[in-house]
Image (cartoon, rainbow, N blue to C red):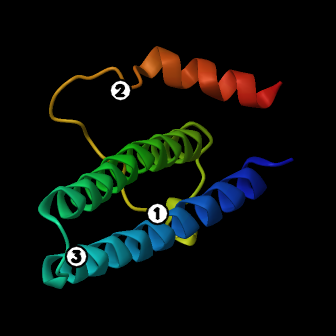
Amino acid sequence: MKYEELIAQLCEVIKESENNAQLIYENAESIDFIVDDLDILLHKKNKIKNMISEIYGLLQNQDLHRQKIERVVNFVCEKNDIDKTQYNLAPSAKNIDSCEDTLSADELELLIKQMQS
């Protein structure tokens, strides 16, 4: 598989992930508004709201994974002089603070090498 084919497939995953995340967020937000209007016991309302909050947390986690894929795609394009504009890629997200989900340049390069084998 050529890098261009790999990048195209990863970009499809990125776009689908973004679209799905937006739909999930909108549906969860709608459910949250509906729950506010329901005449149910407070503890049940709070339980539903906690579940919705967990959905938002999972969406945030999923977005971190999408950003990792974007960084890999941007890295592959840069290292192989591939024109990123043809893939309609956003620049890789930059993390303000360090966290366990941040890939170092070495980790990113190792990931690329693993993909090549």
Whichever of labels 1 and 3 marks the residue nearer the N terminus, that label is 3
Which residue in the rendered view is the most extreme toward the right? 1
Whichever of labels 1 and 2 marks the residue nearer the N terminus, that label is 1
Q: Is residue 115 left or right of residue 86?
A: right
Say which of marks 1 and 3 sits in front: 3
Q: Position of residue 111 (x, y in %)?
A: 62, 24
Pointer 2: what residue? 102
Q: Is residue 46 left or right of residue 21?
A: left
Pointer 3: what residue? 35
Which residue in the rendered view is the most extreme toward the front? 41
Residue in the image at 43% along x and 76% along y = 23
| Secondary structure under the numbered disc 2 in the rendered image | loop
Say which of marks 1 and 2 sits in front: 2
- Kindly report the distance in space between the C-alpha atoms of the residues bearing marks 1 and 3: 37 Å
Q: Position of residue 100 (x, y in %)?
A: 34, 20
Residue in the image at 53% along x and 68% along y = 15
| Secondary structure under the numbered disc 1 in the rendered image | loop
The amino acid beneath tag 1 is Leu
Pointer 1: what residue? 89
The amino acid beneath tag 3 is Val
Say whether marks 3 and 2 touch (CB < 8 Å): no
